[in-house]
Image (cartoon, rainbow, N blue to C red):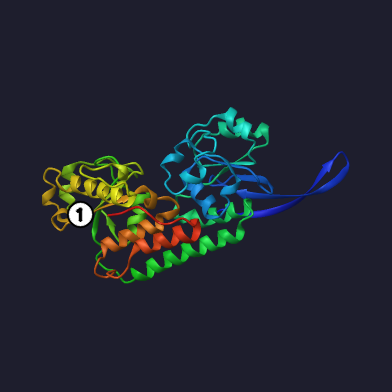
Amino acid sequence: MISVFILLCLSVSGTTAVGQTKIVEIQDANGNFVQVQLPVQRIVVLTSDALEIVCALKADNLITGVFTGISREALFEAKLKQKPKVGDWREVNYELLAELKPDIVLCYARSPGKNLEKKLNPFGIKVIRLNFFKLETLDQEIKTLGLILGKAEQAEALINWHQNRLQFLQEKLKGIKNPPDIYIEGDSRYHTAGPGSGGDKMCTLAGGNNIAKNLSIPYPEITCEWILKNNPEVIIKVATRGSYNIKAKNIKTDIKSKTRLVALKTIQEEIMVRPAWNHIQAVKQKRVHVITNEIWAGPRAVIGASYLAKWFFPEKLKHFNPEEIHKEYINNFHNIKFQGKYAY
């Protein structure tokens, strides 16, 4: 749990109180307490997950620096591509970052390492470590960031939407018996989602039985023979942001949604023709699906879980359209026209 409380302090020059400064103390994703002086007026964002939440809270006007991979973020690239690039979630350009003079830097709990605080604290720059990719802590982290950025009302609206969508999904799956066996494959061949992984939690949330749930590590590499033996009823392939931008042959249109759809189909077809996979139940019944990272993990994981539920229980959820939920999120919280394909 992330706890939040506010301290009121006097800003003193010499022995004279010159004004009142508001300081908020938050508990970050590592359990550490960090004090931040309000209002926050300048921020640098090192992760795509944090960037998405900042934009959803309508605080992107505060962004003074972004990560180098911003060009891969279809939702935000247009409005932020001119911002200085300071590095990524692993390494940063400390000199450039200091020149930007942000009040806070948003990054993951574990990366970059503790050297980030050592380098930035002398400049009065606070490091705020919040993940935004774990379903179990997402709402608390949104609340924390909303408080820091003075966007508590927007944070509450986003949290309410997220909780309502989770509740809706749980209601749809109430009373489900005999969950289908699911094989989840990451971006790399034969790398799956084991116990404790985000993929395993997504599968469970959507009502499926992850065939790798009893393996020894969260992200194991398995064999073709192991998959054939376990004979999953549904196969889920997770594609990175770059994967769905592959241009297939004979495509003459530049429309992003069509290009992405063809790319997702290409990935699906590649899986279905793997040697001996025609013996797998999922392939026989054409229950092989591809989902992009944008809705597989992070702030939009509930959208990804909605697609999984639809695929796992097509008859029960016949009239349920996860894309409508995605459109609702993009239109309401980002004020951007929905485009592209994120699942197939």
Picture quadrant of residue 250:
top left
Tell me residue 226's x, y (percent). Answer: 18, 45
Tell me residue 282's x, y (percent). Answer: 18, 55
Q: Quadrant of the N terminus?
A: bottom right
Q: Is 283 positioned to the left or the right of 335 in the image?
A: left
Tell me residue 86's x, y (percent). Answer: 53, 33
Q: Quadrant of the C terminus?
A: bottom left
* Other-residue count near label 1 (Cα within 10 Å), few / some / many at <14 / 14–19 / ≥20: many
Q: Amino acid at mark 1?
A: Pro
Question: Which element is circle 1 on?
Answer: loop
Residue 117 in view, yes or no: yes
| Residue in front for this viewpoint, 285 or 203 | 285
Residue occupying image coordinates x 64% and y 37%: 125
Name the residue that disc number 1 marks.
Answer: 232
Residue occupying image coordinates x 27% and y 58%: 209
Q: Is residue 171 above or below residue 100?
A: below
Q: Residue furthest front?
A: 252
Residue occupying image coordinates x 25% and y 55%: 182
Residue occupying image coordinates x 66% and y 49%: 25
Q: Is residue 89 above or below residue 300?
A: above
| Residue in front for this viewpoint, 95 or 195 | 95
Picture quadrant of residue 287:
bottom left
Q: Is 17 positioned to the left or the right of 199 in the image?
A: right
Q: Is 116 positioned to the left or the right of 338 in the image?
A: right
| Residue in front for this viewpoint, 186 or 26 | 186
Residue 214 in view, yes or no: no
Q: Residue furthest top?
A: 95
Tell me residue 315's x, y (percent). Answer: 24, 69
